Amino acid sequence: MKLFYRNAIVLSTLNIAVVLVLAGVVFESIKNDKVENILSEKQFEIDFKATDVRNVIRSDTEQVKLLSIMPEIQGIVKFTDYSSSGNFQFDQGFWSGLLEEKFTEIIQNNPKIHQIQIFDLGGNELIHIISDSDEIHIEEHEKLRHSIDKDTYQKVVKLQNNEVVISSISLNQLDDKIEIPNRPIQEIITPIFLSNGEQLGFLKITYDMTSFLHEISQSASGKMLIINNEGYFLDHPDKSKIFGDILGTEINYFVEQPELKENLKEMDNKFHYDEQENEYRIWEKIFYDKNNTSKFWVLLSVTTEEELFLSVEQLRSDVQIVMIPFLAITIVVTIIISRHMSKPIEVLTEKILKIKKGESGDLINIKGNNEISQLGNAFNKMTKSLSQSQHTLKEYEQAMKNSLADAKKFYNQIDQSTAISKFDINGDLTYVNEKFCKMTKYTKEDLIGQNQKILRSGYHDERFYREMWKTILSGKVWTGNLKNKAKDGSYFWEKKIIIPDENSENEIIGFLAIQIDIQDLMEKSSKDWA
């Protein structure tokens, strides 16, 4: 009888030891998988947001370049210069009206635009348009008092055509005081050039970055921080810490984390665990000005161990509660349990293999209060987490589709309000819109396949056309005024912008032409000169 009890005690002890070891192994495995999964999601989030930031900067930069070649902008700068020389009387109101109408349409399609300013070659303000709360205001000429600051002016005067100067994100000022509530802004400046290479002045677009920073800083867990290359916060959950250099708080992340400052000198991204503060940090540099690599932002994800292990600790408590009655069970019960464990293990293994193959990871239903059920719950949590990640990716894809839809809408608006045509490298027309037909009095059937020469009025000589073709065949944008002849024999003046179209191998395959009716403007100019 004593032997029986001794054997029972030994077997029970061995059973308990095995169970405890297995439980510890399972728990550590779940813990490690959970940590790895969360950190992988954080890395994906950082990479995606960094790419999104670069795309926004690239999009804003290209928009500023495109606006600098608008005839309305070039016209107001040119005629202001003529007026100042006393050659003729410049109608400021007429050109301001044209700009207000054009910029109203542009700002409606890009509500991020807060201010549009045009400066002469000396850096003095000519036009100042402000968009705020869906209202557009043009400063009166007598109230224009801004100029390009000295440091920025020294940079922009060195710019060539199609180059820009991009500022970091700062706070907007009104009457030399910081605007309340604070409005984070970014400024992009580009020179205004005519097609003949003559520089007229400068265009500055100020973007409201409030919504942009809010979107970037959103995160399902932990903190998403944005700092500049000097260590000052551009965005932080605690708004009292942002823009310490501008608001005078002098709160600086490099003071808290000096090793980050040193790491930034040697690398562009890093995963780091701080043992002192028990924090996981993932960061990546974002260079917003490709011509100046000393200027950058840092996108930083900070997750504490407490946040990371919150669900794991809950699992630990659940396991401990389940283990108390389970450890009192005899070897006989262990044998019975092992038989019941086989089926759940098979189900779990099957689901794991499906996920490994990339198939759908459906939730599993494992009843009971044991290690396998906890493993099943952990598997379900992992499956839900993966599903949420896929859902987030779909949301981002939908956001990209919405952006493309907005771009298409913007293109359609331009197509409906501006005469547009396309022609191949031989000059044969391949596309015209209704506005173009209305201007030339030809039908689409009359024009498609015909050479552009049918519109020539004889006013310009062959040298004029050779220079035009030389410019666009070299891949440059050509801008100029043309006097053409309509189908009914009447003559009309147009402002023409020709943009080369290249394929993936940078070969010119055709051209896009934007025509603006300037007949009334030319007639008015002729009268002014007379």
Image (cartoon, rainbow, N blue to C red):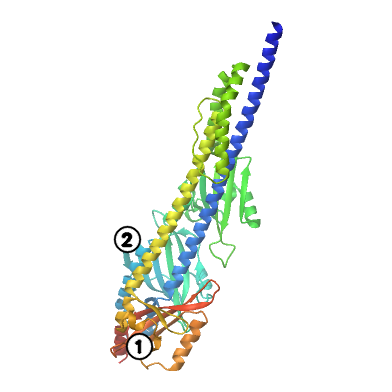
Q: Nearer the viewer, residue 176 or 251?
A: 251
Q: Is residue 44 visible?
A: yes
Q: Indicate whether 220 appears above or below 452.
A: above
Front one among 367 and 120: 367
Residue 44 x, y percent position in the rendering: 54, 50
- Foreground mark, 2 or 1, reads 1
Check disc 2 and give the amino acid type.
Answer: Asp
Residue at the far right: name it: 3
The residue identified by callout 1 is 484
- The residue drawn where x is 64% and y is 49% is 259
The number of numbered badges drawn on the structure is: 2
Q: Is residue 125 left or right of residue 329?
A: left
Residue 293 x/y as whole percent: 59, 63
Give the residue number, with chain letter if any, for mark 2. Answer: 134
Q: Give the left or right position of residue 219, taking residue 489 as reference.
A: right
Q: Quadrant of residue 417?
A: bottom left
Badge 1 amino acid = Asn
> Residue 3 appears in which quarter of the rendering?
top right
Q: Residue at x 54, y 65 (%)?
A: 289
Evaluate whether residue 177 shows in this view: no
Q: CA distance from mark 2 to mark 1?
A: 40 Å
Q: Secondary structure at mark 2?
A: loop
Q: Earlier in the sequence, mark 2 or mark 1?
A: 2
Question: Around disc 2, counting alpha carbons within 10 Å, would you say few (fewer than 14), some (14 to 19), or many (20 or more)?
Answer: few
Q: Nearer the viewer, residue 234 or 15?
A: 15
Q: Position of residue 101 (x, y in %)?
A: 31, 71
Assess whether mark 1 and mark 2 are in contact (beta carbons under 8 angstroms): no
